[in-house]
Image: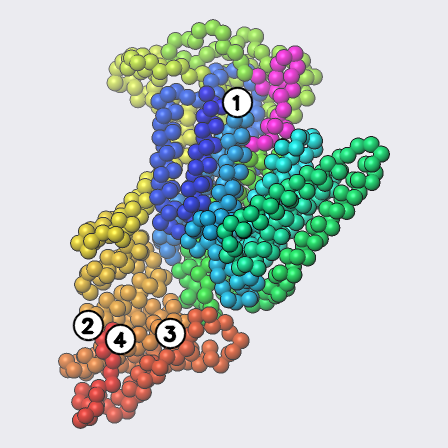
């Protein structure tokens, strides 16, 4: 039963990640909320079915078993995930920069925690490990295969290829982004899958398998390598090289077989890359597919030939083995030269990219210092970068996962994230070192790009952790058989009929397993805290064990036997409350006793229920928002109001609803939304426009000024704010409100002066990055002449223009 459930659990996790792959790695909130709500509901359903059916992970009764030390690295990882989640919850209670971004991070880290717990539980069994390995290969095949088929025109992926005419961005004019729609992150993911298969070659070929098994081991290398090369991501290439070097340092004795086996497939992938790069990722379909199949098969067959030459016996071995090594080295060198010749300008350049990243990192550090210890909540950079940027660059992402974590959660959250990663690295390195390189690729590349904005990347890292630490039983807890018994932990067989309903079994008088051994045999069991069977009955030891589990994730392996369900409600009551008469006043006492035995699980259960309710609420809000996009105008308003009722921090719903309302009601909706996002430049701008449409000049001037402080390098907003305030001044002056017109005109003049000074500063520094093309517009210059002339001639010129002269003030926006 447990084996079958683990197998299905692995398939369920695979389906979750395949869903993430098909939805851009859940980069967008709309996909994330609905998927997380479905995942939470599915987990609750599985938990409820398990409780109803009486399933337990182990059907042992309380037995004389040793206290098995739990994996400390998983405990540290769980503490890291829980700590980061707690910081975001604290921000949500105190009022962050963006409530919507903070709720998103709470959903994300709750998803990471539940996914890690499920994956670690699945990896406990051999069937679960098999399903995890199958899922890993299936996910890699979907990501890589869909991208290559899109290149050859078989599949149509939106934004799967990034086209550009800038040689500094792409040497060939096209970069592969695949299902993730971003070449850099897609390259890092492909590097992880490539290194996992590369370092699996040595143990797979060490036993000298047959030709089919060896070909199956070499088969994934060419497509993964070709996909990695087609991304043209220098950061992914560098991270892959560093991770590969670290893996080879750990596997020094396997460098030669790895080089010989992988040289030909990698060289064939380099040829595929050259052919596709020359065609700018738009080859002819049939000739291109034939070329791909030929190079793929040729690389695999050449790799098999080199492996056979290395393992050849007899007197020719002294000649053929070195010849195979020389041929492999020559093939790798030729492939490297071919790739470098194609991208030499881009590979050796990159000064502009480094300058832009350095500028972003400098501004981000200045922002982080404003709240250094706990950060400012989710999406701090996305909400605040326009207000603090020192130059008009474009950068909605901070391009560093660690720096983004520092902005959101401060130094404490960053330390927790580093502890989480180090614990996962240590666990993988101890249990399965060959999985370290793919894990290191994802952690290293996240330092120079926004990979962690894709939840898929975190889920893949946790998947590698589950596969790595789950492989520990295959190496560390290998079943050593002594006299037909397991030397470590033995399942206690149940021969007699269980005791009355609901009671726990007594300890066996002659325990089998570990305590049937001699003292010298028991002393050889390292890393385990063992107690004799008589000690396990003591309540003090039980409380000590629970306390030890609370502190250091160690608790005695005390297992309970659970009876099958009965159809009788009376028997079910007695099963849960043995020895209790069917009287209402006796039930609370017995229920409290059962509850106290599971007290350490209650916080986790309550926290998961709260997280499930939150994800369901956000998912319903997102569903209403999607329905509103395709609904009629009358129904659209109701759907948008429903979306805001499910999630008041939904800024997209607030924007959509404000477009359907008159100015007076727009102000109410936008002010309510600004409570959850006080630094949102778009909401401030929309509120200023609503006040201007309602004819309230003073509030409009205040909110225009606030919006421009949050987004000062926007030529469009600067110009429109001056035009709107000037129009309000004209209307007020025409209505006889001279003082109001003067205030509006002076506000417009002040904004115009600041706008002109800012534009002159940018224009006077040619070395500044002006990605947003910030400049003083012609409309603003004409408006400056009008305002200055009006201030010099007096306010009467505004009301009565000269005969035959058209008024120079602009119309209302």
| Residue 724 tag number | 4
Mark positioned earlier in the residue sequence (1 or 3): 1
Which one is in front, 724 or 636? 636
Report if residue 614 is visible in the image.
no
Mark positioned earlier in the residue sequence (3 or 4): 3
1 or 4: mark nearer the eye = 4
Mark positioned earlier in the residue sequence (1 or 4): 1
Callout 1–callout 4 Cβ contact below 8 Å: no
| Residue 715 tag number | 3
Q: CA distance from mark 2 to mark 1?
A: 73 Å
In the rendered image, residue 507, in percent from the top left (x then y), is placed at 51, 11
Find the magenta span and give its range: 470-490
Residue that mark 2 sits on: 695
Q: Quadrant of residue 47?
A: top left
Callout 1–callout 3 Cβ contact below 8 Å: no
At 37% from the left and 79% from the top, the residue drawn is 777
């Amino acid at each position: 039963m447990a084996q079958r459930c683990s197998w299905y659990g692995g398939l369920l996790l695979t389906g979750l990640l395949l869903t993430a792959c098909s939805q851009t790695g859940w980069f967008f909130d709309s996909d994330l909320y609905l998927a997380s709500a479905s995942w939470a509901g599915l987990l609750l359903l599985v938990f409820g079915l398990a409780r109803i059916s009486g399933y337990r992970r182990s059907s042992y009764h309380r037995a004389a078993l040793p206290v098995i030390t739990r994996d400390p690295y998983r405990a540290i990882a769980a503490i890291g995930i829980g700590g980061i989640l707690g910081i975001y919850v604290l921000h949500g209670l105190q009022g962050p920069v963006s409530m919507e971004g903070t709720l998103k991070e709470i959903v994300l880290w709750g998803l990471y925690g539940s996914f890690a717990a499920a994956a670690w539980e699945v990896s406990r069994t051999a069937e679960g490990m098999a399903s995890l390995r199958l899922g890993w290969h299936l996910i890699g095949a979907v990501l890589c295969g869909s991208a290559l088929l899109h290149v050859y025109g078989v599949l149509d992926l939106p934004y799967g290829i990034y086209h550009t005419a800038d040689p500094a961005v792409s040497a060939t004019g096209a970069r592969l982004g695949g299902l993730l729609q971003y070449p850099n992150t897609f390259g890092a993911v492909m590097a992880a899958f490539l290194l996992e298969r590369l370092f699996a070659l040595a143990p797979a070929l060490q036993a000298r398998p047959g030709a089919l098994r060896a070909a199956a081991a070499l088969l994934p290398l060419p497509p993964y390598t070709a996909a990695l090369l087609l991304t043209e991501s220098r950061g992914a290439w560098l991270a892959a090289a560093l991770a590969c070097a670290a893996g080879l340092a750990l596997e020094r004795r396997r460098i030669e077989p790895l080089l010989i086996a992988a040289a030909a497939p990698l060289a064939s992938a380099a040829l595929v890359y050259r052919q596709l790069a020359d065609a700018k990722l738009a080859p002819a379909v049939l000739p291109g597919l034939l070329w791909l199949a030929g190079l793929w098969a040729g690389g695999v067959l050449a790799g098999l030939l080199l492996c056979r030459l290395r393992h050849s016996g007899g007197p020719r071995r002294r000649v053929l083995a070195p010849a195979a090594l020389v041929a492999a080295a020559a093939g790798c060198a030729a492939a490297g030269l071919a790739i470098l010749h194609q991208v030499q300008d881009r590979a050796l350049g990159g000064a502009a990219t480094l300058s832009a990243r350095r500028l972003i990192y400098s501004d981000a550090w200045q922002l982080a210092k404003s709240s250094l210890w706990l950060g400012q909540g989710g999406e701090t950079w996305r909400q605040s970068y326009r207000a603090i940027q020192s130059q008009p660059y474009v950068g909605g992402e901070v391009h560093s996962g660690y720096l983004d974590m520092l902005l959101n959660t401060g130094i404490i959250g960053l330390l927790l994230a580093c502890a989480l990663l180090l614990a996962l690295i240590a666990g993988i390195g101890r249990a399965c070192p060959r999985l370290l390189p793919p894990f290191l690729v994802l952690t290293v590349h996240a330092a120079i790009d926004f990979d962690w904005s894709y939840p898929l990347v975190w889920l893949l890292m946790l998947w590698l952790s589950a596969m790595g630490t789950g492989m520990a039983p295959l190496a560390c807890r290998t079943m050593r058989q002594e006299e037909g018994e397991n030397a470590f932990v033995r399942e206690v067989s149940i021969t007699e009929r269980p005791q009355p309903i609901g009671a726990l079994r007594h300890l066996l008088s002659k325990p089998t397993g570990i305590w049937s051994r001699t003292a010298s045999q028991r002393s050889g069991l390292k890393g385990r805290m063992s107690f004799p069977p008589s000690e396990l009955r003591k309540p003090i030891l039980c409380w000590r064990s629970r306390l030890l589990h609370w502190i250091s994730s160690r608790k005695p392996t005390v297992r309970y036997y659970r009876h099958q369900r009965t159809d009788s409600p009376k028997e079910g009551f007695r099963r849960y409350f043995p020895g209790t008469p069917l009287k209402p006043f006796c039930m609370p006492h017995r229920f409290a006793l059962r509850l106290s035995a599971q007290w350490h699980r209650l916080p986790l259960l309550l926290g998961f229920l709260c997280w499930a309710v939150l994800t369901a609420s956000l998912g319903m809000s997102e569903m209403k928002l999607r329905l509103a996009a395709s609904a009629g105008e009358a129904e659209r308003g109701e759907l948008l109001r429903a979306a805001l009722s499910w999630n008041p921090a939904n800024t997209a719903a607030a924007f959509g609803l404000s477009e359907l309302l008159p100015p007076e009601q727009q102000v109410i909706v936008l002010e309510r939304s600004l409570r959850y996002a006080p630094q949102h430049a778009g909401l401030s701008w929309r509120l200023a426009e609503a006040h201007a449409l309602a004819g309230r000049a003073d509030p409009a001037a205040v909110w225009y000024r606030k919006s421009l402080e949050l987004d000062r390098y926007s030529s469009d907003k600067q110009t429109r704010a001056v035009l709107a305030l000037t129009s309000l001044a004209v209307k007020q002056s025409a209505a006889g409100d001279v003082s109001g017109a003067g205030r509006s005109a002076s506000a417009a003049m002040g904004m115009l002066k600041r706008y002109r000074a800012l534009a002159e500063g940018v224009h006077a520094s040619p070395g500044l990055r002006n990605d947003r093309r910030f400049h003083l517009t012609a409309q603003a210059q004409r408006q400056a002449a009008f305002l200055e002339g009006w201030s010099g001639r007096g306010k009467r010129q505004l009301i009565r223009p000269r005969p035959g002269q058209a008024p120079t003030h602009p119309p209302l926006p």
